[in-house]
Image: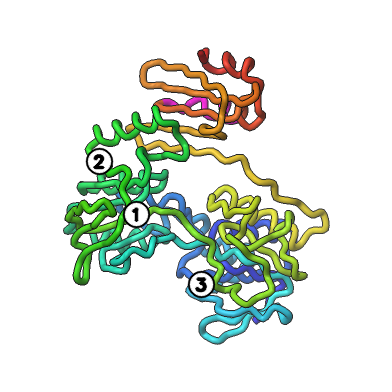
Amino acid sequence: MKAKYLIVGNGIAGHSAAKAIRSKDKEGSIILIGEEDYPTYFRIRLTKNLAKEFSLEDILLKDKAWYEENKIDLILGAKVVKVKEDEKTLILETGEEVEGEKILFATGSYAFVPPVKGHDLEGVFSIRFYDDVCHLQDYLKDKKKVLVVGGGVLGLEAAASLKALGKEVYIAQRSEYILDKQLDDELGFKLNDIFEAQGFHLLTQKNTQEIKGHDHVEGVLFDDGSFLEMDSVVFSTGVRPRLDLFEGSSFKKDRGLKVNPDMSLDKEGYFAAGDLVEVGGRPLGLWTASMEMGKIAGHNMCADDKETYAQPKLFTKMDLGFVEVFSAGEVEDYDQAYRYDEGDLHAKIFAKEGYLVGAILFGDTSKMNAMKKMVFNKTPIDEAKGAIYPFV
């Protein structure tokens, strides 16, 4: 089997690349290989959908008819196990070989689960794929107590969904408060209070040491010696690029696969995009970033006017119904801080050397876009103080 464009991985990066290629090259053959049995879907909706009954069709980006209309050949449920670099040929787990004139790697990342004792017991989950949600929902039908390890956005979204399912939810966080990378101490502790008032059990400054049980989860032991009986554990402790395919290859890698600004690799005809790659020395692991990388890679695989990928401006938005949080830029390294409080709204801006470097909106994020623009433009602090709210 052979194609002009061969894409490995049908997450958002691979999908965006195929779409970009077809917009430029109407006839060149495209093969898109995916390990899951499904076309591309909205992975970022999984944690929120955990609380409800939903089907794969509810979260698909495009149905199979779209791929047929765009002459994109799907090979699903297939794993690439080897790359013949010089021949531009991929070997599938079945032994079948697929050749491409130009090849894009977009194999994504895997959910990182710390290798604590008992992490492989029945009842331990991470949420990365559609099937993960299905298995977790089924497992929890007759269970009551669930521990979520990790107090980042996805962990908190999962915790909220689990509580909506009627479960008693515990959240284990290594630091003193949840969303510790996005909030300062004051608002971090305020968020702790809100979650506890909603009925969540927060276990701060806790490290999971061991998951106890014979063949399934029965409890969790923490490194301070405390123990809690538990029916299930959900890890939300980040993702890591899937680099196993490139062991022994000539492709450069560190924390992720190293790419040039145009998303090409150093070997002619090869490209990479998405969670797999590192940008600015680290993997990003962001849906929007992967989408943009895939779009640029696809364009550059078939166009002469090359585009380059610029490191994105990172921000966080969380809306769980009972609380809204927005954070952008630097909220730890600053020399001036200003605040504005009105009712449930708590807004803070942070400056360094006279310029805005970070911002937090807590309780009301309606001014998020304007605040984000000011932070990323490094607005002079004297201008920023009165532009959106009267900060003091």
Magenta-colored stretch includes residue 368: yes
Over which residues does the magenta segment extend?
364-372
Sooner in the amino-acid sequence: mark 1 or mark 3? 1
> Residue 148: x, y in percent?
31, 51
Give the residue at mark 1: 54
Sooner in the amino-acid sequence: mark 3 or mark 2? 3
Please tell me how crowded label 1 is: few (under 14), some (14-19), or many (20+) other residues with Cα within 10 Å.
few
Gap in angstroms between the C-alphas marked 1 and 3: 21 Å
> Residue 126: x, y in percent?
37, 59
| For residue 123, side relative to residue 182 (left or right) | left
Image quarter for residue 363? Answer: top left
Which residue in the rendered view is the most extreme toward the right? 304
Sooner in the amino-acid sequence: mark 1 or mark 2? 1
Give the residue at mark 3: 76
Type of the residue with mark 3: Leu
Can you say whether 98 is above or below 293 in the image? below
Q: Tell which tag, 3 or 2, sits nearer the viewer.
A: 2
Residue at left offset 24%, top offset 58%: 232
> Residue 128: x, y in percent?
42, 59
Type of the residue with mark 1: Phe
Badge 3 element: strand
- Viewer-nearest residue: 253 or 336: 336
Badge 2 element: loop
Type of the residue with mark 2: Phe
Residue at left offset 82%, top offset 54%: 305
- Viewer-nearest residue: 145 or 68: 145
- Viewer-nearest residue: 237 or 303: 237
Q: Which mark is residue 200?
A: 2
Gap in angstroms between the C-alphas marked 1 and 2: 25 Å
Please tell me how crowded label 2 is: few (under 14), some (14-19), or many (20+) other residues with Cα within 10 Å.
some
